[in-house]
Amino acid sequence: MFILDKPYVSSYLVDTALKYGYPVLKNAAADELELNQELNFYCEGFAANQIKEGKDNLVYCNSENAIDWITKNLDSTDIPRQISLCKDKVQFRKLISKIYPDFYFEEIDTEALCGVDSSKLKFPVVLKPKIGFLSFGVYPIYNEKEWQNTIQTIKTDIEKYKEIFPKSVVNTSSFIIEEMIEGDEFAVDVYFDAENKPVILNIYKHPFSGSDDVSDRIYFTSKNIIKTYLEKFETLFEKIGCTMGLKNFPCHIELRVNDKAIIPIEINPMRFAGWCLCDLAHYAFDINPYVYYFEQKRPCWNDILSKMDDALYCFTIGDNQGIKDIKNIDYKAYSDDLISSNSAKYSAPSNKLFELRKIDYKNFPIFALAFIKLQDEDEVFKVLNMDFNKYIEV
């Protein structure tokens, strides 16, 4: 069953629900999102009973906003427990401390942050809400001066997050301080089946423009990424699935990889990559991640990889650069620049724009989502460092 909520539902997800007849919860968000009325809607009471009775026990949420409904209506199932273990970053760290006994972390009440003796912290550290979403409220801190500056900005930021997200998605009543995990960042769309076994549906590399960058501007996958990391990540996720008791559970796992270890950053429950980024699997691998989860299918990676080229399949976000009162976006220029090559090695047709999704920039901090095909990481870093201001008319 799909439980759909704001901020964004892709047409690809809706078309999947229509084509396969998957049930969709008829909630207030479905009305606000003006979802297709031909969907197989279940009213809330009937939906809750179906899930409790195990008749539609596979649940997928496009947004963590749906967690409130699950917590209130499915308390007799194991789903709220699994969600809580993932959303609460302190609980999560405590559980996997069996796997990572030397990893440093501690919880601090927000009101107590000002009283922390930063001279005793082992920098660099990361400070983030105990319950969070994407990169909102994540602060990488490298020294005592940066710590003091960060504490000064947190109060303002907290008010901003309250306006955007419910407490079940971002809760800033307390923070977690943890050691900074060095290495390349990856994100994985995976579900755990009825036997705690992980089924990986996509692996993305998540590059940053610098040490202070915590944005979600671009993710990409490729044949080489899958071949390099599939077995390594599966082995780790098997341990995590058993430790946390994850069953019939879709999630998006973020982790860092260095030459010494593979260390999870967090697990985002009940969904794959946010803002329907997981739709990239359609363009990269010709698989539908929603169908694979609901039908409990495993990708035949050998076959998939044998048909792939060596290109990078990317998802990128066009953000508003903190600008308010935007009058217009030059989507044509933005689209053209995304796939224009900055290398003499490639002709312009080598890159490809699969799809551009325009977002309501007056109500959200982004103006577009795009699925593109690039040729190498130099092309990726060109997109990562694009100046979006030139597409924004104020």
Image: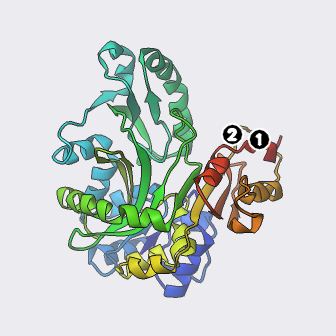
Amino acid carrying label 2: it is Gln
Scheme by which the image is coloured? rainbow
Q: Which residue is mark 2?
A: 321
Badge 1: residue crowd in 10 Å (few <14, some 14–19, many ≥20) = some
Quadrant where the N terminus lies? bottom left
Q: Residue 71: give x, y in percent of width and height.
A: 34, 57
Label count reads: 2
User: Can see residue 329?
Assistant: yes
Badge 2: residue crowd in 10 Å (few <14, some 14–19, many ≥20) = few
Asked if 2 appears above or below 121 in the picture, the reply is below
Asked if 32 appears above or below 174 in the picture, the reply is below
Instruction: For the residues labelled 1 and 2, say whether their Cβ atoms are less than 8 Å apart.
Output: yes
Q: Nearer the viewer, residue 51 or 231?
A: 231
> What residue is drawn where x is 50% and y is 18%?
149
Q: Which residue is mark 1?
A: 389
Q: Residue 79: give x, y in percent of width and height.
A: 29, 63
Q: Nearer the viewer, residue 271 or 302?
A: 302
Query: What is the residue that sits farthest to the front in this orientation?
Result: 345
